[in-house]
């Protein structure tokens, strides 16, 4: 912690990633599901750092890890991850070759891909079944057509993916029924059957399947539901300048904010090139010294201004633009709602210019 404090005292803007909270979120969701986890650490663990996330989750009962691309899987292997790594997107024959070389487990949903995997020598793979997402996988009502291939190269797992598990609209139940129908149509039931993402896992306890595939919950997103994760990503910046702006004077590009009274404006070195979206101009709110202050004027590429007139503020003070500061919390959902982004986009949109500080 001391080393980190020294390190972050040099930093202007950064993301504190709370790996203990990440692990506790994993424990919480696993307890709720009653089955092991296959944490989704695709897209660099939703922007927070796949290597660190994998290490933090390592003590839990894991089936393996989930990624989206062969490259992401190769990176985990290079870090020494030896557990199964499932790649959740359709792969080209060249991808399959690389997946085999790295010891990754592909998820396949077309006759051509299954045949290609088999011709290259086979190995563990999971059958992707499309029950209504219509993104990837074999249609639930045509998996019977694959019977011959499946007998020749039986998958160790089969799965589907829900399109609206956060909604109570009956679609998840319909997809589950289609999944069960598809499983019944296979020549043999694979050892591992899985379906639940974060929202589905939270809604259903215990899980009906072999393991669950949570992503966003691990990274602290899921407020409002029965089971709430702890925040994991805290985006912070240090006040680098303070100025007094007189009534009638404007702040930032296009002069969209104008002082109605003598105002104190703080500048933080964080802008849309860091992932703090320009659409937060004049609508974003941030945490500072026990209070909440608004963004004043347009967010610029590298800097954002705040109206701190009503809160004590000095150069060097730390502002939290997302996450927890003391008793106050601004969730990724709240920041996302203010700028029209899903919390998924917000997290994966945090740019590399913001160092990730692990604690
Ligand atoms: C991303 C993904 C998940 C995790 O989804 P969350 O909503 O983040 O929990 C699970 N399964 C598949 C196939 C995915 O692509």
Image: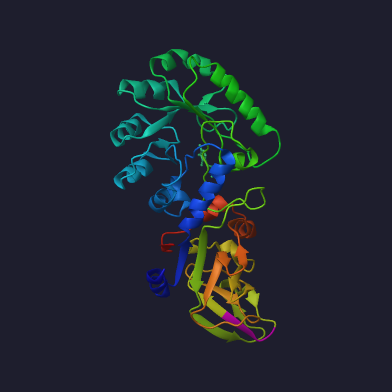
The secondary structure making up most of the magenta span is strand
Examine the rendered structure and indicate whether residue 85 appears above or below residue 244. Answer: above
Q: Position of residue 257 (x, y in %)?
A: 64, 75
Residue at screen point 39% across, 50% down: 55
* The C terminus sits in image quarter: bottom left
Kindly identify the residue that appears in the image at 56 percent across and 43 percent down. Answer: 31
Examine the image and state in which quarter residue 258 appears: bottom right
- Give the residue displayed 47% in from the left and 39% down from the top: 38
Q: As rendered, which of 225 and 312 lies closer to the eye? A: 225
Q: Is residue 118 within the magenta segment? A: no
Total residue callouts: 0
**In the image, residue 296 above or below residue 180:** below
* Colour mapping: rainbow
Question: Is residue 313 toward the left or the right of residue 98 in the image?
Answer: right
Q: Quadrant of the N terminus?
A: bottom left
| Highlighted magenta segment, given as a residue range | 261-265
Taking the image as drawn, is residue 242 in sight? Answer: yes
Foreground of the two, 253 or 210: 210
- Is 262 inside the magenta-drawn segment? yes
User: Residue 222, image x and y in percent?
Assistant: 61, 50
| Residue 216 visible in the displayed image | no
């Amino acid at each position: 912690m001391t080393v980190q404090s020294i390190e972050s005292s040099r930093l202007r803007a950064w993301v504190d990633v709370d790996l203990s909270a990440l692990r506790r979120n994993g424990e919480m969701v696993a307890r709720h599901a009653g089955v092991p986890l296959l944490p989704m650490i695709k897209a660099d663990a939703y922007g927070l750092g796949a290597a660190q996330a994998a290490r933090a989750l390592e003590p839990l009962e894991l089936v393996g890890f989930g990624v989206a691309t062969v490259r992401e899987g190769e990176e985990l292997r290079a870090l020494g991850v030896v557990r199964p790594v499932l790649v959740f997107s359709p792969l080209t024959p060249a991808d399959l070759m690389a997946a085999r070389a790295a010891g990754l487990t592909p998820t396949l949903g077309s006759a051509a891909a299954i045949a290609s995997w088999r011709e290259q020598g086979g190995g563990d793979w999971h059958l992707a079944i499309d029950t209504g997402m219509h993104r990837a996988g074999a249609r639930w009502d045509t998996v019977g057509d694959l019977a011959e291939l499946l007998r020749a190269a039986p998958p160790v797992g089969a799965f589907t993916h829900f399109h609206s598990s956060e909604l109570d609209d009956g679609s998840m139940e319909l997809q589950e029924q289609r999944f069960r129908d598809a499983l019944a149509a296979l020549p043999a039931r694979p050892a591992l059957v899985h379906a639940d993402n974060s929202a589905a896992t939270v809604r259903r306890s215990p899980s009906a399947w072999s393991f669950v595939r949570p992503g966003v919950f691990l990274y602290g997103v899921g407020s409002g539901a029965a089971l709430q994760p702890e925040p994991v990503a805290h985006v912070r910046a240090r006040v680098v300048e303070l100025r007094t702006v007189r009534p009638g004077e404007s702040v930032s590009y296009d002069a969209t904010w104008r002082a109605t009274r003598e105002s104190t404006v703080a500048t933080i070195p964080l802008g849309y090139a860091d992932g703090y979206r320009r659409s937060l101009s004049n609508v974003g709110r941030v945490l500072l010294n026990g209070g909440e202050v608004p963004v004043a004027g347009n967010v610029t590429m590298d800097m954002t201004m705040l109206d701190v007139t009503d809160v004590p503020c000095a150069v060097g003070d730390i502002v939290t633009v997302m996450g927890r500061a003391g008793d106050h919390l601004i969730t990724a959902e709240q920041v996302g709602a203010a700028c029209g982004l899903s919390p998924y986009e917000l997290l994966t949109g945090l740019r590399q210019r913001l160092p990730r500080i692990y604690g």
